[in-house]
Image (spheres, grey):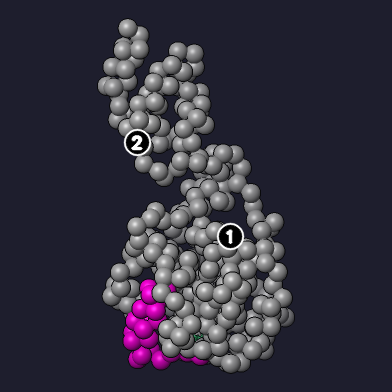
């Protein structure tokens, strides 16, 4: 895989085998054509099509299942083991995407609902204002890299005392679409806030992020802005020629200093399993510290010392209730 960002004006189904090696991509974020006559989407949305770049290539609903199987098979091949994929889908052809995913070894991590503003206006039924995001990973020998704490520290709270980290990791995301009056855009351009969130949690600087359906190159632009490398495909000559020019001007890392910095400590051992030795050390330290502190201050100190969150420590203490008193009596004797 080249060091710089390379994009292909080709069909991803035939282009991938030519250009992208097996197991070479760290993260895929993609938003395939929806098979709902996306080339006529403006009939549903109340917006001025003069600013929408034309050339969008749609897939007929009758071919959607076969199409989904073909590109998802390529996605599976190019992802590295433990690499992750986010697929944005409407509900109309969601079945076909799920069917295609089921035919692979890819494993579901979450089925995310993205709730947005500007839903499709209807008079005699509820207004549709969400997309599905299918978040999967390729099985592998390592641990999944999920950057918990990259946006909110474990202790950060909202006004009502709710954990911001918890809220940010819930599987319903409320993120507005970008309203860009008077600016050129692609159909269904994904908002930067949505892409930033996926890229922050699921990749590191220098990783390769691929979008098989580039459209307005939003994934690529945000990925480069966050100092990742980007690649991908767009079948439409018109869209490709227009958008490739913008992406050339994107400066690597330009978004990094716009990111919110998590406050407080991020537990370095969060998510790692406890070893028996570590558990034993924790119990001994707990007994010692409890002689001079109350339980809450003791756990705070232990959190820092062991690089673990409050509940992780509580869990070990609870499971070892009997052992605590045994080791306490041993240390007292
Ligand atoms: C839903 S749009 C992607 C929008 C993009 N995520 C953005 O934020 O601008 C899907 C894009 O896939 C392109 N496309 C359709 N079939 C394709 C194929 N087989 N290979 C590559 N691109 C394709 C369409 O022309 C369209 O631009």
Q: Which residues are magenta?
A: 57-78
**Residue beneath the point at 60% across and 87% down:** 240
Q: How many marks?
A: 2
The Cα atoms of the two marked residues, 2 and 1, are separated by 30 Å
Q: Relative to 325, is 217 on the left or the right?
A: right
**Residue beneath the point at 48% across and 36% down:** 307
Q: Secondary structure at mark 2?
A: loop
**Residue beneath the point at 48% across and 82% down:** 19
* Residue behind label 2 places its C-beta within 8 angstroms of ligand 1: no
| Residue to which mark 1 is pinned | 205
Q: Out of 101 and 173, give the one closest to the viewer.
A: 101
Residue 149 in percent (x, y) is at 53, 48
Q: Is residue 149 above or below residue 280?
A: below
* Residue behind label 1 places its C-beta within 8 angstroms of ligand 1: no
Q: Give the main secondary structure of the magenta stretch.
A: helix
Residue 177 is inside the magenta segment:
no
State whether residue 112 appears in this view.
yes
Q: Out of 313 and 252, give the one closest to the viewer.
A: 252
State whether residue 49 appears in this view.
no
Residue 72 is inside the magenta segment:
yes
Q: Is residue 187 above or below residue 298?
A: below
Q: Secondary structure at mark 1?
A: loop
| Residue to which mark 2 is pinned | 275
Q: Out of 74 and 2, give the one closest to the viewer.
A: 2
Of marks 2 and 1, which one's residue comes earlier in the chain? 1
Q: Relative to 224, is 62 on the left or the right?
A: left
Residue 251 in percent (x, y) is at 70, 69
Residue 298 in percent (x, y) is at 48, 23
Question: Pointer 1: residues within 10 angstroms few (<14), some, or many (20+)?
Answer: some
- Which quarter of the picture shows residue 136? bottom left
């Amino acid at each position: 895989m080249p060091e710089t960002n390379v994009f292909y004006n080709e069909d991803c189904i035939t282009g991938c085998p030519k250009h992208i090696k097996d197991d070479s991509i760290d993260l895929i974020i993609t938003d395939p054509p929806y098979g709902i006559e996306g080339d006529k989407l403006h009939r549903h949305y109340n917006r001025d099509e003069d600013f929408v770049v034309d050339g969008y290539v749609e897939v007929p609903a009758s071919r959607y299942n076969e199409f989904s199987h073909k590109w998802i098979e390529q996605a599976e091949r190019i992802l590295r083991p433990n690499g992750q994929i986010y697929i944005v889908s409407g509900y109309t052809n969601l079945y076909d995407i799920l069917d295609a995913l089921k035919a692979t070894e890819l494993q579901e991590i979450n089925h995310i609902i993205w709730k947005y503003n500007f839903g499709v206006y209807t008079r005699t039924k509820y207004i549709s204002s969400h997309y599905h995001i299918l978040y999967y990973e390729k099985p592998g020998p390592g641990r999944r890299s999920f950057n918990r704490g990259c946006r909110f520290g474990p202790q950060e709270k909202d006004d009502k005392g709710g954990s911001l980290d918890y809220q940010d990791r819930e599987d319903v995301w409320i993120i507005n679409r970008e309203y860009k009056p008077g600016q050129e855009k692609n159909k269904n351009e994904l908002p930067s806030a949505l892409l930033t969130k996926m890229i922050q949690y699921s990749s590191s600087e220098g990783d390769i992020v691929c979008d098989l359906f580039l459209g307005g190159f939003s994934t690529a632009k945000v990925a480069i802005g966050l100092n990742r490398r980007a690649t991908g495909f767009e079948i439409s000559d018109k869209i490709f020629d227009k958008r490739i020019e913008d992406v050339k001007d994107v400066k690597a890392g330009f978004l990094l200093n716009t990111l919110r910095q998590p406050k407080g400590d991020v537990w370095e051992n969060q998510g790692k399993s406890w070893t028996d030795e570590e558990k034993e050390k924790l119990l001994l330290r707990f007994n010692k510290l409890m002689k001079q502190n109350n339980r809450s201050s003791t756990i705070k100190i232990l959190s820092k010392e062991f690089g673990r969150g409050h509940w992780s420590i509580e869990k070990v203490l609870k499971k070892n209730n009997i052992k605590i008193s045994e080791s306490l009596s041993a240390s007292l004797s």
